[in-house]
Image: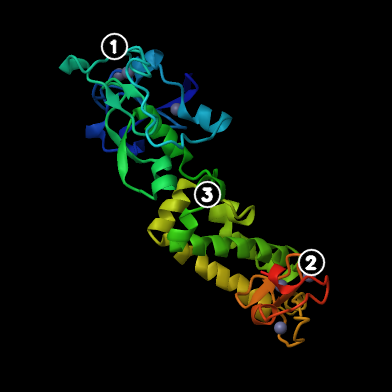
Amino acid sequence: MKVVQSHKFVCQTVTQLKFHPSQIYCETCSGLIWIPVQSCFVCLECDYISHGQCLNSVKRICASVKVKENPCYVLEICPEKSLRNQNYRCAECKAGISFHTALTQPLLCDYSGNYFCSECHWGSLSVIPSRVVLNWDFHEYPVSKGSKQYLNLMMKKSIINLETINPKLFSFVEELAYVKRLRSDFMIMKEYILTCKDALEAKLLRLLEDRQHYVENSDYYSIQDLMDIDKKDLISYLEPIHNQFLMHITQDCVGCRGKGHVCRLCGQLPELFPFEISATQCEGCYSVYHRHCANKRDVVCPKCGRVNHTIK
Ligand SMILES: [Zn+2]
Ligand SMILES: [Zn+2]
Ligand SMILES: [Zn+2]
Ligand SMILES: [Zn+2]
Ligand SMILES: [Zn+2]
Ligand SMILES: [Zn+2]
């Protein structure tokens, strides 16, 4: 392995390559890589491809460095910087660029808003995080090579708190509101599962291991999550798991069922659980009641004495 600009380059043979060998270009010199006559090195972290002989000229730092040190997104839509601000130079390699001559046409990166030369911007397309979270727009736009690699590596990082960035989305993207409900249920259900021997033995939480952040919090999303919500894939993945948790806690497991609440407004069984649609919680003391019991006029929480307008 050869480390250059924090890339971890490994020489690849034709059979190891993920791409078709006729289309492989060196990202350092933009020339075709003639395999197997020329050696082809690929970065294990970001997939940067280079001729062996070009490795020492690699200028761009591996995208994985920023992913590790400061994983965050530009959340303005294409914040165009102007050529003047860039001194009429490519944002990456500093080659001169201008609209004045055809040879050095500046190319705009839709993610960063910077202009690049044609060596550093190959017109790769990518979904743009700011367009997703602000416009719910999943079209692909042209980005620089560096941005493309960074966005690829960031795809599954759950760092987007939609509730703070754009809470309005929840009111007009139905699927998103539904996923939010499922996720907040998971957080409540987790408490039951973690204290139930049978559920732990059955490894119920493992069902969510592909989306580990769903058992850690209910607020953060990755771009992959949002793309899957848009394609309706996420709901078909989450719903059966939600059902399985629900069945375990409210039906199948005596231990979990015993931790249910009896509505103190009506005293009726079966036990209620805070994640059930028919249940609601007092905002003062978190006692669990039937929604229809709590919503009656002039209801007072028997436990803490709050009147019903504070019961959700
Ligand atoms: Zn790399
Ligand atoms: Zn090269
Ligand atoms: Zn350049
Ligand atoms: Zn249980
Ligand atoms: Zn009740
Ligand atoms: Zn109360």
Going from the N terminus, do you reach mark 3 or mark 1 first? 1
Q: Does the residue at mark 3 contact the one at mark 2 (Cβ under 8 Å)?
A: no
Q: Position of residue 232 (x, y in %)?
A: 40, 62
Circle 3 or circle 1, nearest the eye:
3
The residue sitting at the front extreme is 298
Residue density around tag 2, few if under 14, some if 14–19, many if 20 or more, within 10 Å: few
Q: Does the residue at mark 3 contact the one at mark 1 (Cβ under 8 Å)?
A: no
Q: Look at mark 1 in the image and give the residue it sits on.
A: 96
**Element on which disc 1 rests:** loop
Residue density around tag 3, few if under 14, some if 14–19, many if 20 or more, within 10 Å: some
Query: Disc number at residue 162?
Result: 3
One can see residue 47 in this view? no
Q: Amino acid at mark 3?
A: Leu
Q: Look at mark 2 in the image and give the residue it sits on.
A: 285
Q: Position of residue 193 (x, y in %)?
A: 70, 66
Residue density around tag 1, few if under 14, some if 14–19, many if 20 or more, within 10 Å: some
Left or right, 39 with reference to 214: left
